[in-house]
Image (cartoon, rainbow, N blue to C red):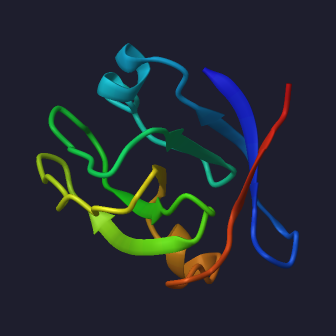
Amino acid sequence: MKKVMITNQSNEILFNNAKMTTNFHERLSGLIGKKGLNEDSALCIKPCNGIHMLFMKFPIDAVFLGKREEVLYLIESMQPWEISKIVSHAQCVIEMPVKSIQKKKIALYDQLKIISHE
């Protein structure tokens, strides 16, 4: 996985310790087997337009981004064993700790930036 940072349109750092998937296996497994995410961590799954929580042990928030990294769809507190809808124009999904959407004030149509750390 590649280390990335996620910022909002005001260049505030939302997640300084995020990771981006780089292959099919990483996209498929995602956060399966993990016990949780700390507040500064997130997982960017790209390309992706839908996610599942099969075999997950903890809830997450999920943000679906379009090709210009604009927020197209939000899921708060997605629970283990749930499956999201397919968001047709989504290019990327950011999985983050539960309550992150509210705490970091992420809203529909916000512009987020995914910046490589390496």
Asked if residue 4 is positioned above or below residue 11 in the image, the reply reads above
Q: What residue lies at 47% left-to-right and 17% top-to-bottom? A: 23
- Quick one: 95 or 91, which is closer to the camera? 91
Image position of 18 (left or right of 106): right
Instruction: State which quarter of the image contains the N terminus.
Output: top right
Quadrant housing residue 32: top left
Foreground residue among 82 and 47: 47
> Where does the image place residue 24, in percent across and percent down from the top left?
37, 18
Residue 89: x %, y % from top left: 37, 62
At 27% from the left and 47% from the top, the residue drawn is 51
Identified at 46% across, 64% down, the residue is 63
**Residue 6, percent across and down?**
73, 54
| 28 horizontally vs 100: left or right | left
**Which residue is at a point 26% across and 39% down the rendered structure image?**
57
- Above-or-below relation of 21 to 10: above
Q: Is 113 left or right of 31, judged from the image as shown?
A: right
Residue 109 in which image quadrant:
bottom right
Please state the horizontal and vertical placement of residue 31, each as a whole percent of the image: 39, 32
User: Dividing the picture into quarters, in which one does residue 7 lie?
Assistant: bottom right
* Residue 23 to residue 108: above or below: above
